[in-house]
Image: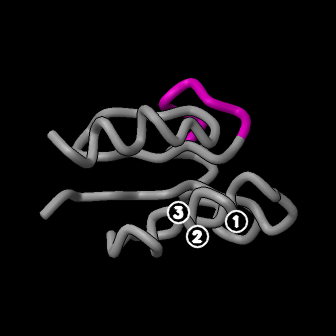
């Protein structure tokens, strides 16, 4: 089973698309909302990102809702 973390914000439509896609594929994930979680925001910035969504799949980062890249990493 893959370790999946999704960094989101409360107002991000692409975050919703990413979460829905993972749910449809039956993938469980940990959501970290940078709008309400200061530690999550610090983690995201430490990785060098300012925007969301950022999906981390077994350590590999996907910036934005890149469905093909997400599916490719999940299928490995």
Which residue occupies the extreme right position in the image? Answer: 11
Looking at the image, do the residues carrying marks 3 and 2 touch, with CB atoms under 8 Å apart?
yes
> Which label number is shown at residue 67?
none
Residue positioned 63% across, 51% down in the render: 41
Q: Which quadrant of the rendered structure holds the N terminus?
A: bottom left
Q: Is mark 2 on a helix, strand or loop?
A: helix
* Tag 3 residue: 21
Left or right side of 37 for 21: left
Mark 1 Cα-neighbour bin, 10 Å: few <14, some 14–19, many ≥20: some
Mark 2 Cα-neighbour bin, 10 Å: few <14, some 14–19, many ≥20: few
Residue 12 horizontal/vertical position (percent) = 81, 57
Q: How far apart are marks 3 and 2 (CA)?
A: 4 Å
* Tag 1 residue: 16
| Rendered position, 9 above or below 44 | below
Residue positioned 33% across, 58% down in the render: 4
Q: For residue 27, what is the image quadrant?
A: bottom left
| Rendered position, 40 above or below 59 | below
Instruction: Say which label, 1 or 3, has the lower sequence index.
Output: 1
Residue positioned 46% across, 73% down in the render: 24
Looking at the image, do the residues carrying marks 1 and 2 touch, with CB atoms under 8 Å apart?
yes
Q: How far apart are marks 1 and 3 (CA)?
A: 8 Å
Residue 66 horizontal/vertical position (percent) = 56, 36
Residue 71 on the magenta span: no
**Over which residues does the magenta segment extend?**
44-51
**Depth check: 39 or 23 in front?**
23
Q: Distance between the residues labelled 1 and 2?
A: 6 Å
What secondary structure characterizes most of the magenta part? loop
Q: For residue 8, what is the image quadrant?
A: bottom right
| Rendered position, 9 above or below 54 | below
* Tag 2 residue: 20
Mark 3 Cα-neighbour bin, 10 Å: few <14, some 14–19, many ≥20: some
**Of discs 1 and 3, which sits in the foreground?**
3
């Amino acid at each position: 089973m893959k370790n999946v973390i999704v960094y989101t914000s409360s107002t991000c439509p692409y975050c919703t698309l990413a979460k829905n896609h993972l749910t449809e594929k039956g993938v469980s994930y940990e959501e970290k909302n940078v709008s309400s979680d200061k530690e999550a925001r610090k983690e995201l910035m430490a990785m060098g990102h300012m925007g969301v969504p950022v999906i981390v799949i077994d350590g590999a980062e996907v910036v934005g809702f890149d469905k093909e890249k997400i599916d490719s990493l999940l299928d490995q």
